[in-house]
Image (spheres, coloured by chain):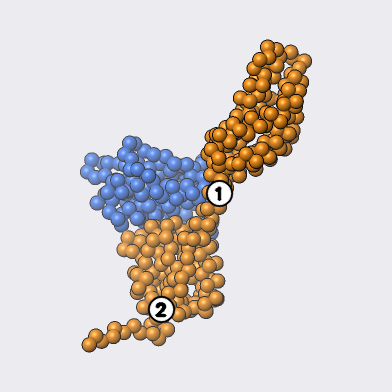
Chain colours: A orange, B blue
């Protein structure tokens, strides 16, 4: 038996002669499983390609799928799993597609009493198991990529720069200010300053829970950069507990104008521009 | 994160995300101990500074947070452990405005002013442990 290890001539022969009917049955089984979310034609073309790549691997065990002969099937599975993630299939559904082939192959060899063939089928089964696990891995990796993309998009979304008056921009900051976010904020702010020709920018930190030295340093850098471009920055939204913490930390805001609320900051900016907000007399 | 009171909790510090996680954990404990809003903010800010020091200067490590009680009052204790190069000159490290890195140089000294108790245990080549406590007033 050992002389045959790594080869499975009978099984390969069986698979080759029954390719058409096997794929048909496989497609049928998976189509039922996915309840019409994939058409039979799509499945058939996927599985045909898959089967062609799988056939030369029959007879090898799936213990080390990182070997070069697995490269082709790996890339095929990766694409398959990736598509499945994007179209909202669960990882079980993705892996079951592969496992379904097992039952069809068992069906094919059921009546045969050759123990050697049985061994070959068993090995084929563990190969499919290994490949099924690979789809899990690829599935998870594709998911992680999507999550990373989304958090990058969120980064862009959560740092809006808005024009609140002619010549006055506002940047409401919410959450945690890390280096990546400050970089985004600074770039966006400087761009908007040029675009709108604004001379005032209000950075509102009402939504920032804690201001530590790193946050302060980022803020100071942003203010200096804006100043170099001829714009004045006002930091607003400094709550009492933040003010006390900043004092205890010993952070100097120097000559940067700070205000308790965004409204105060806006009034300050308008006044600097010579605009006074006056209440109209109600008759 | 649900409030927890069963013993100390540890978090490893190996990346920027972990600094945020430590901050959230300390905040949960501070709220649970019912520290005032100002004290919560002070402790969380100190934890943020120290966790970042552990990461940047200590090369990573872990933080331990727990509720403490000295019989008269409750408080929160947070300690930050690393096995980095240690601090060769404590006086200098605790001086305002001095930094061996690129920061403002206020982190360590500022953190000390933000808490009620501050312990620094460091040995060159062995690592540093900073322990801080904030008591409920």
Indicate which disc residue A146 carries.
1
Residue sitting at 40 percent across and 44 percent down?
Answer: B79
Q: Please, which chain is the residue tagged with disc 2 on?
A: A
Left or right for A69, reference B117: right
Quadrant in which residue A280 is drawn: bottom left
Q: Neighbour class for label 1 at 10 Å: few (<14), some, many (≥20)?
A: some
**Rendered-image quadrant of the N terminus of chain A:** top right
Can see residue A158?
yes
Q: Is residue B17 above or below residue A236?
A: above
Residue sitting at 38 percent across and 82 percent down?
Answer: A271
**Rendered-image quadrant of the C terminus of chain A:** bottom left
Can see residue A248?
no
Residue sitting at 34 percent across and 69 percent down?
Answer: A260
Q: Which residue is mark 2?
A: A269
Q: Is residue A241 above or below residue A127?
A: below
Residue sitting at 61 percent across and 36 percent down?
Answer: A135
The image position of residue B30, as x and y in percent, is: 32, 48
Which SS class for mark 2? Answer: helix
Query: In the image, are marks 1 and 2 on the same chain?
Result: yes
Left or right for A21, reference A141: right
């Amino acid at each position: 038996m050992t002389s045959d290890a790594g080869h499975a001539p009978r099984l390969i022969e069986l698979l080759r002669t029954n390719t058409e009917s096997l794929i048909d049955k496989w497609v049928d089984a998976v189509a039922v499983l996915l309840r019409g979310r994939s058409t039979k034609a799509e499945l058939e073309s996927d599985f045909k390609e898959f089967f062609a790549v799988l056939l030369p691997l029959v007879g090898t065990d799936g213990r080390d799928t990182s070997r070069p002969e697995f490269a082709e099937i790996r890339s095929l599975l990766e694409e398959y799993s990736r598509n499945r993630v994007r179209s909202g299939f669960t990882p079980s559904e993705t892996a079951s597609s592969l496992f379904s082939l097992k039952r069809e192959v068992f069906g094919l060899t059921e009546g045969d009493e050759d123990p050697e063939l049985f061994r070959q089928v068993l090995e084929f089964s563990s190969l499919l198991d290994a490949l099924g696990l690979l789809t899990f891995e690829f599935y998870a990796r594709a998911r992680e990529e999507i999550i990373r993309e989304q958090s990058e998009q969120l980064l862009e979304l959560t740092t809006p720069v808005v024009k609140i008056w002619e010549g006055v921009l506002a940047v409401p900051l919410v959450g945690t200010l890390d280096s990546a976010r400050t970089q985004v904020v600074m770039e966006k702010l400087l761009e908007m300053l040029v675009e709108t020709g604004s001379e005032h920018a209000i950075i509102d930190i009402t939504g920032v829970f804690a201001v530590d030295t790193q946050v302060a340093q980022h803020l100071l850098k942003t203010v200096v950069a804006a100043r170099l471009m001829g714009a004045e920055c006002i930091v607003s939204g400094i709550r009492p507990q933040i003010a006390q913490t900043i004092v205890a930390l010993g952070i100097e805001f120097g000559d940067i104008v700070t205000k308790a609320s965004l409204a105060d900051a806006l009034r300050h900016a308008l006044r600097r521009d010579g605009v006074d907000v006056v209440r109209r007399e109600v008759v | 994160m649900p409030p927890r009171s069963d013993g100390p909790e540890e978090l490893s510090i190996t990346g920027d995300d972990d600094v945020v996680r430590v901050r959230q954990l300390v905040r949960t404990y501070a709220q649970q101990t019912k520290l005032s809003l100002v004290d919560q903010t002070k402790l969380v800010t100190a934890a943020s500074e120290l966790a970042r020091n552990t990461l940047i200067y200590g090369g990573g490590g872990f933080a331990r947070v727990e509720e403490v009680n000295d019989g008269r009052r409750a408080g929160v204790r947070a300690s930050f452990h690393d096995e980095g190069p240690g601090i060769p000159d404590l006086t200098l490290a605790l001086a305002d405005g001095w930094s061996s890195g690129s920061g403002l140089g206020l982190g360590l000294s500022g953190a000390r002013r933000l808490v009620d108790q501050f312990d620094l245990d460091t040995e060159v080549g062995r690592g540093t442990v900073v322990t801080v406590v904030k008591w409920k007033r």
